[in-house]
Image: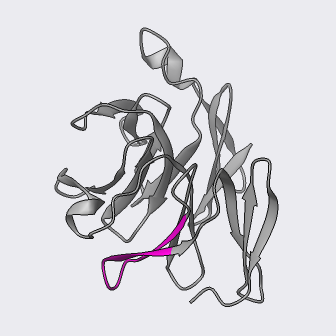
Amino acid sequence: HKAIRRQRQMCIRDSYGMVSYDGNTIVPHLPLSAHTSPKIYNDIPAMVPIGDDRIYFITSLVFGVYDKSRDSFTPIVLDDSETYTALCRINQDEILIGSNKKLTVYNTSTGEYHDMSSENDTTVSGISSIYQDRIGQIWVGTNREGLFRYSPHERKLYHAGTLNNIECIYQASNDKIYVGTRNSGLYLINNPY
């Protein structure tokens, strides 16, 4: 189970769907698959809240939004359909979407999106993990291209390491970055910036 905490309300997802909890009441929501045919929304590896009413999510094949006020799920079609792998909120209006092919920046206010390589000279594919640290830097792990750090303030992507098969990224209270890999163990980045 993973939880999203927002102003006095928590949304919890699991393989059966989603429930919201405001501290007093648990409200079950139908599984995403109950809203669609065929059942393509069952596995949701990542989601981010934007505002009070919208939760953006990915499945391996779909990027979409759940509108709480309408209790509806809407898929969002991006060009060059791909396998979505990770999702992270950049700021109030933008989401970073990782896939097997690229990093995409999606503006939730305008619906516009673009490949991050249009902002940077670096093309990143095979994204396996995205993590935003305490100062707002976004760490992107890949299967074969290493570790990257995206600075939202500079709108720039930096190559941060040659690790491969990155599964997860975490920042400890001492600001050190831990990188978990498949088949190669755990790595520590002492001075990440």
Q: The N terminus lies in which quarter of the figure?
A: top right
Q: Nearer the viewer, residue 68 or 171?
A: 171
**Label total for image:** 0
Q: In this view, does 94 lie to the left or right of 59?
A: left
Q: In which quarter of the image is residue 19?
A: top right
Q: Which residue lies furthest to the right in this view?
A: 185
Q: Which of 128 and 59 is in front in this view?
A: 128
Q: Nearer the viewer, residue 123 or 54?
A: 123
Q: Residue furthest top?
A: 38
Q: Kindly identify the residue that appears in the image at 56 percent across and 62 percent down.
A: 146
Query: Residue 90, how many percent across, how many down?
Result: 40, 68
Query: Residue 181, how many percent across, how many down?
Result: 74, 55
Q: The C terminus lies in which quarter of the figure?
A: bottom right
| Up-down relation of residue 67 to residue 148 (above or below) | above
Q: What stretch is highlighted in magenta?
A: 147-159
Q: In which quarter of the image is residue 142?
A: bottom right
Query: Residue 112, how many percent across, how many down?
Result: 17, 53
Query: Residue 23, how many percent across, how many down?
Result: 71, 57
Q: Is residue 66 left or right of residue 107?
A: right
Q: Kindly identify the residue that appears in the image at 81 percent across and 64 percent down.
A: 186
Q: What sort of colour scheme is used for the picture?
A: one colour
Q: Nearer the viewer, residue 126 or 133?
A: 126
The secondary structure that most of the magenta stretch takes on is strand
Q: Is residue 149 magenta?
A: yes
Q: Kindly identify the residue that appears in the image at 45 percent across and 41 percent down.
A: 100
